[in-house]
Image (tube, grey):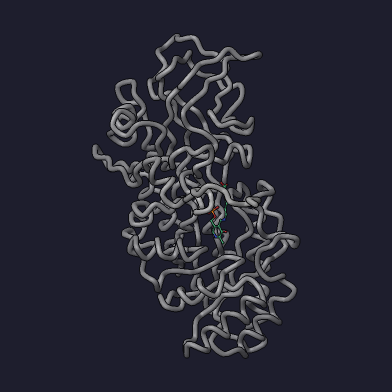
Amino acid sequence: MSQFRYQAGVLSAEDVQLDRIADEVGTPFYCYSTAEIEQNYADFVEAFGGQDASVCYAVKANSNLAVINTLVQLGAGADVVSEGELRRALKAGADPRKVVFSGVGKTREELNYALDQNILQINVESASELDMLSGIAASRGQEVEIALRVNPDVDAGTHAKITTGTRSSKFGISIKDGAQVFARAADLPGVKPVSLALHIGSQLTELAPFEVAFRTLADLTQALRDNGHTIDRLDLGGGLGVTYDDERPPAVGDYAAMIKRTVGHLGCSLILEPGRFLVANAGLLVSRVVHVKAGDARPIIVVDAAMNDLARPALYDAFHAILTVREAADGSTMRENDVVGPICESSDTFARSVTLPSLVTGDLLVFSSAGAYGAVMASTYNTRRLVPEVMVRGSAFAVVRSRPDFDDIFALESVPQWRQQPSTRGAA
Ligand code: LLP
């Protein structure tokens, strides 16, 4: 059951009415439910009961320290893709021995930092990265366990911008080169290949592409074992979809059963990197109506959240159900509206023709299912302050990222010296 429900006619997160938070924190803001995150995690872990599987939460989905900490305290590790994410995960309490580091462009500095922290595994995505990492680790006298991320050439059937496992994508090592690169890795100093990894995309709503990819990975594992290599760990990435609208993603139990069917016979320990599944439906973005404009076809509701706060509709035409914080009274007139943000480009449109009760300036709206890839993708475009984040637990709430002041935005910028003096250029 969702933790976002109407209570006494007001949409609430657990036992906190959202208008109360809006009054205290101002709008827009993200709001997360602890109970929902806990439930999602419990569902995921339960589905894998009986399998030797660890959850490395894909921190990129929502890297707020409070969110990571919630999952870490439940036992999760972390999948990180940058030094910044690694620092966050550790700061939030993650055990370095439960951290895997993925990413197609890790730099020397990032690899050095990961080696400093003695994390569990680095997922190597190219022969070039393999050479770089081997050189760095060997010069430090270290040997790091690595996975080779392979690209199985499977179309995940999701949005093109979040598909990662096709041949033409930038991710991983082509499956046909996997055996040869693994064999090379086994001969290099500083690295110990123990695992294969893949991730074919995000928001998958069918099991079939996963299944093809995992079978391909199982075949490669077997082939490498036949060549005398030891592989005792597989990293199966993330990607399990959630319901935003009317999608019917596979049940997590079916996903887990399919994994057992496809790779279970290998006896490997498994790493899973769910992001969206754990947090998407545990968060929403709360925003206030600034203006109601007469539009050509229908009213245009201008809200105080924008594409810089929630980029998904602009970037991927993503759907986020829009609800009013005050429950519409029975029999109230509903009408179609366009809902837009204030940013100076047409892509700052959240939804067209959305049916809502009649709205006036000051009303509160929410964009649902915004806990994943929401706040983490926010920017200060149009010099808008980064959107704050609030976490609810029962009847308590805490601001877990506050709204910066404008001076915080300007603090890192400066006007060069030469602009501050009268120009002498061109003087005789
Ligand atoms: N592991 C790796 C290596 C990944 O690249 C990703 C996501 C995940 C795990 C987690 O996938 P999830 O379980 O969350 O689907 N910004 C986009 C999504 C980008 C996903 C990138 N990689 C969006 O808003 O839909």
Q: In the rendered view, tell whether residue 168 sits above or below residue 16.
A: below
Question: Which corner quadrant of the figure contains ligand 1?
Answer: bottom right
* Residue at the farthest front position: 428
Percent across and percent down for residue 105 are: 60, 67
- What's the residue at 68%, 71% (across, down)? 173
Q: Would residue 161 be found to the left or right of residue 359 on screen? A: right
Q: In the rendered view, tell whether residue 224 sits above or below residue 38.
A: below
* 201 vs 134, nearest the viewer: 134
Q: Would residue 387 be found to the left or right of residue 195 on screen? A: left
Residue 117: quarter of image? bottom left
Residue 230: quarter of image? bottom right
For residue 32, say whether it is visible. Answer: no
Quarter in which the N terminus is drawn: top left
* 83 vs 181, nearest the viewer: 83
Residue 325: quarter of image? top left
Q: Exactly how many numbered labels are in the figure? A: 0
Percent across and percent down for residue 229 are: 61, 86
- What's the residue at 41%, 58% (across, down)? 45
Percent across and percent down for residue 64 are: 39, 52
For residue 175, say whether it is visible. Answer: yes
* 118 vs 174, nearest the viewer: 118
Percent across and percent down for residue 297 are: 65, 14
- What's the residue at 24%, 39% (across, down)? 396
* 403 vs 64, nearest the viewer: 403
Q: In the rendered view, tell whether residue 369 sits above or below residue 166.
A: above
- What's the residue at 35%, 46% (across, down)? 401
